[in-house]
Image (cartoon, rainbow, N blue to C red):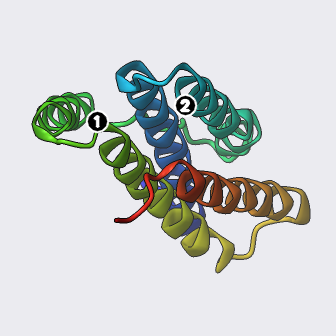
Amino acid sequence: MLRNEKQIALNEVVVACKKAADVYDACADRAQDPDMARLLREAAAERRMGLPGLEEWLQASGDLPREPDEDAETARGVLTSLKSALSPDERQSVVEDCERAEDELEQAIAVALRLDFDKPLRRTLKQIYGQAEAGRKRLKNLAPESS
């Protein structure tokens, strides 16, 4: 089945949301500070909140939502664990990983918003984008102070 550009763009947002949620969960597992772990888990849940509406639109359009590439995610997880183990500052490593996931999500949403989606879906995309922006601000507050 060939996907149209809207399906492709929305699938990229779905995958980026799922990846961001998975990164937040993995970082919460690595976080030594329980308060930080709680905030990261909340962010993971927030990234998953918009998924049902996006996935419903894809299904209604005749497409199935994609899943993140398992092999790539496994490799990313191994590299993240290795980086974390070698990093003298676990907190900074966690923040950087989460920021990278938010970047990917924001980029995917920006591409999707250039397309002519209906108002409810655009509203959902903008809401997820706003959550990602807010997440980035929270991450800056979690980052260790510069010396």
Note whether residue 51 is visible: yes
Q: Is residue 21 above or below residue 11?
A: above
Q: Nearer the viewer, residue 60 or 75?
A: 75
Amino acid type of the residue that numbered disc 1 sits on in the rendered structure: Asp
Circles 2 and 1 in contact, beta carbons < 8 Å: no
The residue where tag 1 is placed is 69
Q: Position of residue 77 (x, y in %)?
A: 23, 30
Q: Is residue 132 left or right of residue 131?
A: left
Q: Position of residue 139 (x, y in %)?
A: 55, 52
Q: Is residue 133 left or right of residue 139?
A: right
The answer to which of marks 2 and 1 sits earlier in the sequence is: 2
Q: Residue at x 50, y 56 (%)?
A: 102
Q: Nearer the viewer, residue 112 or 138?
A: 138
Amino acid type of the residue that numbered disc 2 sits on in the rendered structure: Met
Q: Position of residue 42 (x, y in %)?
A: 67, 29
Note whether residue 1 is visible: no
Element carrying mark 1: loop
The residue where tag 2 is placed is 36
Q: Position of residue 76 (x, y in %)?
A: 21, 38
Q: Residue at x 52, y 34 (%)?
A: 21
Which of the 4 image quarters holds residue 75? top left
Which of the 4 image quarters holds residue 29? top left
Neighbour tally class for label 2: few under 14, some 14-19, many 20 plus, Cα within 10 Å: some
